[in-house]
Image (cartoon, grey):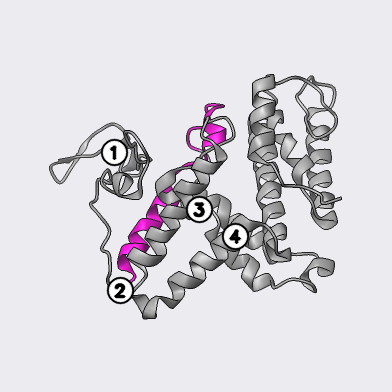
Amino acid sequence: MSPSGIENGAKSNGIIETDLGVVPVPKVEGDWTVDKAVNTIGTGKYTESSNSPIGYFHLLERLKTTKREGWRRFDINRGESISDHMYRMSMMTMLAPASLAEKIDVNRCIKMALIHDMAESLVGDITPVDNVPKTEKNRREASTMDYITKRLLGNVDGGKQGEQIRAIWQEYEDSKTPESLFVHDIDKIELLLQMVEYEKRGKGKLDLGEFTFVKTKVGLDEMRAWADEIIQEREQFWAGKEHIRRDGGDEGAITKQKEVMQEAYYAGHGRKE
């Protein structure tokens, strides 16, 4: 079966091929609930209250297929998935600078990086400009994590793994431990890396400078050094060309509305004075 045949809508074994890699984010009418979201899944509901984790494994596919929405506003429709983002984050945590590694549980950070966006498997990737209040975003994600860890994993190994996943996710959300603060910074550093990579691939025709704002929300000194290096790399790429920069350089402009939304989304993040 040739790839070109699939792309042209050819038949294989009598079945009309469609893009089976496209898995829509659940669209819910009225108040968002987990059950409403699950009811939209084309492959059927995941097995609940089982002592097998297979239903949970199937749900994880949605992290592979759900795109990070921020880039889609710039017509990057085949960009990174949520799993792509979390995988690179987990690899980055393994290279925590020695000054941090000696003070944190790096293995816990790796788990946290792989878990922190798990709720987006059903909720989708809600961005600062989506007009979803932060409290509502948190409600949807918390209820999704309860569904995953209690209804899908509650009977697996006595519920121990589900409880651990839920606890690590909550630790990230609460943003109080050294591990969670580190992973929050890694989350932003990974975004900055992806921003520069897309811009370079766009050969100067794609300005993603509004995302440089997240650099101002990086809190740890060691992570700020990484962010500075990435921004310097970006400045070398844009040298001599007009571009947006919102990490303190404040070149170019975005709407005031976007500024307000970004500030609200990242409230509480950044350096603790």
* Mark with earlier residue (1, 4): 1
* Mark with earlier residue (1, 3): 1
Q: Dot 3, crowdedness within 10 Å: few (<14), some or many (≥20)?
A: many
Residue with the mark numbered 3: 83
Magenta span of residues? 53-78
Q: Residue at x 54, y 67 (%)?
A: 167
Residue 22 at x, y = what percent? 35, 41
Q: Camera-side residue: 30 or 235? A: 30
Q: Is residue 60 magenta?
A: yes
* Mark with earlier residue (3, 2): 2
Q: Is residue 271 above or below residue 132?
A: below
Under tag 2, what secondary structure? Answer: loop
| Magenta segment main secondary structure | helix
**Residue type for callout 4:** Ala
Could you say which quadrant of the image residue 193 lies in? top right
Q: Residue at x 80, y 35 (%)?
A: 247
**Residue type for callout 1:** Ile
